[in-house]
């Protein structure tokens, strides 16, 4: 049974918690948190595991992501999580606001897709700098190879976005083996890739609403209207890379 996007993020939160060691974790950095689709459920579920912790929700909040942190702040207040979640605006390639070796766990979801190879390496170097020895990381990215027509439409739509953080996309998502090789090069250890079944499908009406929300070129929607009616949109499977410093 296909699930909603909100349900997908709730299940992704469970997946991350199941595959991470939450003992001795007190400071979590979520890089590229956006509007908090993952931040909020993570905080709610971490309460049941950790006696005391803080989540640093870090985002550029500019360009296509303008106002993301403002929306997250509203959600944090609404959910009464202001004592647990701190928002920080900045660039993941140069996180001046984060001290060396101050973070126990770094997580991200669909962050690397917004970075080219050079920016990805700079970002991973920053992650290595701020992570404590033996600290953990978990980074999720959607599989760039579609398995269904609905996934193919999802991936193609991404390349027709009218708003991009970088001048030109280098990839829909980087392949996991390339990211793992770079992590190994930079000194990360115990690297492991696991797969998360997103199972999120949008029927025609919801698919069109989502494409407009993502500011996808209307020409793409018009061109693929029959396919969208037939297949809708479907999130590809996600590969999640786990490692330690």
Image: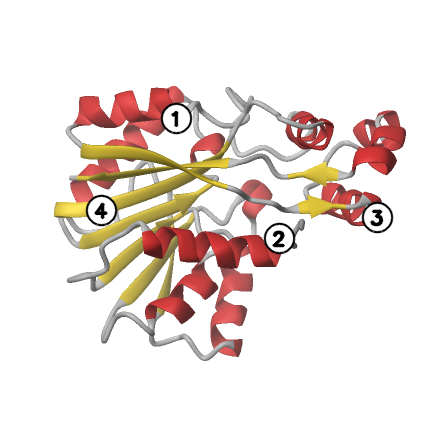
For disc 2, the marked residue is: 5
Mark 1: few/some/many CA within 10 Å (<14, 14-19, 20+): many
Please report whichever mark, 3 or 2, sits nearer to the chain's N-terminal start. 2
Q: Quadrant of the C terminus?
A: top left
Residue 85 vertical position relative to residue 88 in the rendered view, above or below:
below
Q: Which SS class for mark 1?
A: helix
Residue sitting at 67 percent across and 49 percent down? Answer: 2
For disc 3, the marked residue is: 205
Q: CA distance from mark 4 to mark 2?
A: 26 Å
Q: CA distance from mark 4 to mark 3?
A: 40 Å
Q: Which SS class for mark 3?
A: helix
Q: CA distance from mark 3 to mark 1?
A: 32 Å
**Label 2 near label 4: C-beta < 8 Å?**
no
Where is residue 44 shown, x and y percent of the image?
Answer: 41, 70
Where is residue 64 shown, x and y percent of the image?
Answer: 59, 42
Q: Which SS class for mark 2?
A: helix
Please report whichever mark, 3 or 1, sits nearer to the chain's N-terminal start. 1
Give residue 176's mark.
1
For disc 4, the marked residue is: 136
In-image side of 147 versus 225 (left or right): left
Give residue 114's mark.
none
Where is residue 15 shown, x and y percent of the image?
Answer: 41, 52
Q: CA distance from mark 4 to mark 1?
A: 17 Å
Mark 4: few/some/many CA within 10 Å (<14, 14-19, 20+): many
């Amino acid at each position: 049974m296909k699930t909603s996007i909100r349900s997908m993020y709730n299940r992704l939160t469970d997946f991350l918690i199941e595959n991470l060691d939450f003992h001795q974790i007190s400071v979590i950095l979520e890089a590229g948190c956006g509007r908090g689709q993952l931040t909020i459920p993570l905080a709610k579920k971490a309460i049941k595991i950790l006696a005391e912790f803080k989540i640093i929700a870090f985002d550029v909040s500019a360009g296509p992501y303008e106002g993301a942190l403002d929306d997250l702040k509203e959600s944090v207040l609404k959910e009464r999580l202001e004592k647990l979640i701190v928002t920080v605006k900045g660039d993941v390639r140069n996180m001046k606001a984060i001290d060396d070796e101050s973070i126990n766990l770094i997580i991200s979801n669909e962050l690397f897709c917004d970075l080219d190879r050079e920016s990805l390496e700079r970002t991973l170097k920053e992650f290595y700098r701020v992570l404590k020895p033996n600290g953990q990381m978990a980074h999720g990215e959607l599989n760039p190879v579609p398995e269904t027509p609905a996934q193919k439409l999802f991936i193609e739509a991404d390349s027709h976005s009218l708003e991009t953080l970088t001048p030109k996309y280098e990839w829909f998502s980087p392949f996991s083996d390339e990211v793992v090789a770079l992590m190994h090069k930079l000194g990360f250890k115990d690297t492991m890739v696991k797969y998360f079944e997103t199972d999120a499908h949008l029927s025609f009406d919801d698919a069109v609403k989502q494409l407009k929300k993502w500011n996808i070129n209307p020409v793409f929607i018009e061109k693929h209207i029959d396919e969208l009616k037939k297949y809708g949109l479907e999130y590809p499977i996600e590969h999640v890379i786990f490692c330690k410093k």
